[in-house]
Amino acid sequence: MSTAVLTKDAKHTLSVLVKHNLNTFSRIIGIFSGKGFELDSVTFASEAEPGMARITITTHGDEKTVEQINKHLHNVVDVLKVTDLTHRKCIERELAIIKVSTAKAGRSEIMLIAQAFKSKVIDITNDKLALEVTGNTDKVDAMIQVLRPYGITEMSRTGSVALKREFQGPININ
């Protein structure tokens, strides 16, 4: 467990296992809007077990605020388990699709940037490239910042998906 002092702006990642229905999802979103909690991103997807879903929530707040969020989540019907991944080793990824104008710079320069971030070119037109990047949020944010001066014309991001890491040894992969 981390001993870092957390500020009001500390990021928290919560993994919520639920019975798969949109009413549960609506109730969870309602907690954030009704109580004024910060909501950075939320993903909702089917789980390996039929009839189950996993909701990954990223939020900001101090320990007391996140404790309140946890209590509210546990009170939602059909929420089976809430795991705060903030202080645990976890696997966390995000996907972004970024369309970049190639008018200001050569296409090859943008493709070199894509290669440096291990992203993929997924669509090409005469004046635009569409790139797919996956990784942790910092990597996605960094790629967006590097591409911004070239002219990002459109972008879509998934938000984080995360699971507790089972392997507890040292890991050198990204």
Image (cartoon, rainbow, N blue to C red):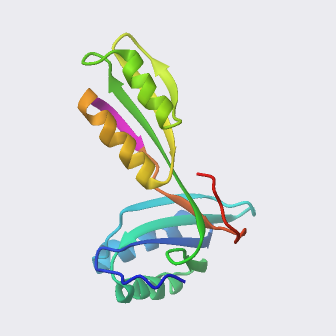
The reply to whether residue 151 is in sight is no
Residue 172 vs residue 67: left or right? right
In the displayed structure, would residue 143 be above or below residue 171? above
Residue 54 part of the magenta segment: no
Q: Quadrant of residue 64?
A: bottom left
Badge count:
0
Q: Quadrant of residue 4?
A: bottom left
In the displayed structure, would residue 158 be above or below residue 42? above
Q: Nearer the viewer, residue 2 or 83?
A: 2
Magenta residues (range): 151-156
Q: Residue at x 38, y 86 (%)?
A: 63
Please identify the quadrant where the N terminus is shown.
Answer: bottom right
Residue 155 part of the magenta segment: yes
The image position of residue 21, as x and y in percent, is 58, 65
Residue 130 vs residue 90: left or right? left
Q: Nearer the viewer, residue 108 or 44?
A: 108
Q: Residue furthest right?
A: 49
Q: Residue at x 45, y 61 (%)?
A: 42
Q: Nearer the viewer, residue 34 or 146?
A: 146
Q: Residue at x 55, y 71 (%)?
A: 15
The image position of residue 5, as x and y in percent, is 36, 84
The image position of residue 137, as x and y in percent, is 44, 54
The reply to whether residue 73 is in sight is yes
Q: Is the stretch drawn in magenta largely helix, strand or loop?
A: strand
